Image (cartoon, helix red, strand yellow):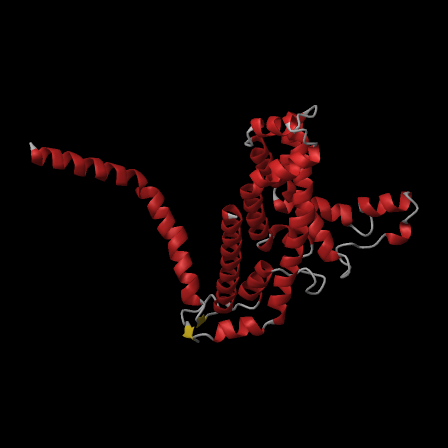
Amino acid sequence: MKMNLNLNIIKDYATSYLFILPALVIFLVFGLYPFIQVFWLSVHSWDGISLAKDFVGMRNFVEVFQDRYWWQGMWHAGYIAVLALTFQNAVALILALLVDKGIRGGNAFRVIFYLPPVLSGIVVGLIWSWIYDGNYGLLNNVLTHMGLGNLARAWLSDPKTALICVGIIHMWKGFGWGFVILLAGLQGIPRELYEAADVDGAGSWHKFVHVTIPMMIPVFVLVIILTILGTMQIFDIIASTTNGGPGYETEVPVTRILASMLGLSRFGYACAQAVVFGVILLVISMIQLKISKSMKQA
């Protein structure tokens, strides 16, 4: 009887593991193995074609830290991230507050505001390229009709405006997901807290400062982390608009990695860049989580 019971338990365990086996195989083949390969290739010199892979130790990493174009790309991504953290998330919060208040057509706005994030980044980039076009772009036409034709230019080809124009595209595409997360957080706040504040005679601003913000801190931290991580990995919009140009003015880490890999055929160096980039993102996430934990305990 005991043996039969043990056999049944083993059979149940085997059946359970059999169900997760496909997902485990996919993770090992397409997740863990490439992850290990990146670290292994980062200490080798390889052109991506030949069988020979020369061990170079930390030489690739030393070169990454001396590569000014790599760090210029990091600065560009950080600049866009700051724009997204401020303007993009401010717009998302304002819209979420308005919809949470029950404005007319709120359900329609939920759908409209979430449309940009679900669109392909390549498609969005192409549409905005037409808007920014120096010859027949919508933006220049609007400026001309407003009597501001002297401001017209090839926006994505001008080193002075290319980076901020790419940042605007990224913010337009990204504010919708922040809106959805913030709205979910606002609707999760117990309404009794607002009713109690009303009884105490608190105005809208005091309720926002003393009720909404404290209750929304975990949501704010989540949005900040996702904004930074998502923006630092920006690629599709860059690829479909400027491809890192003019010159290196809109280069970001992912485009630099791709340029090293495909343009220079230096796969080992590209993997070293990817490792450094991953460590930087990990450190940023850990710092933000530590700050979040400190704020919760305060």
Residue 132 visible? The answer is yes
Which residue extends farthest top? 104
Residue 80 located left or right of residue 133: left
Looking at the image, residue 178 sits to the left or right of residue 273; the answer is: right
- Residue 296 location in percent, x, y? 51, 46
Vertical position of residue 148 compared to residue 266: above or below: above
Residue 119, visible in the rendered structure: no
Residue nearer the viewer, 176 or 242: 176
**Between 222 and 243, the one nearer to me in the picture:** 222
Closer to the camera in the image, 225 or 38: 225
Q: Is residue 223 above or below residue 110?
A: below
Most extreme residue toward the front is: 200
Residue 34's image quarter? bottom left
Q: Position of residue 220 (x, y in %)?
A: 58, 44
Q: Which of 106 and 114 is in front in this view?
A: 106
Query: Which residue is drawn at the image coordinates 77% and 45% (left, top)?
Result: 131
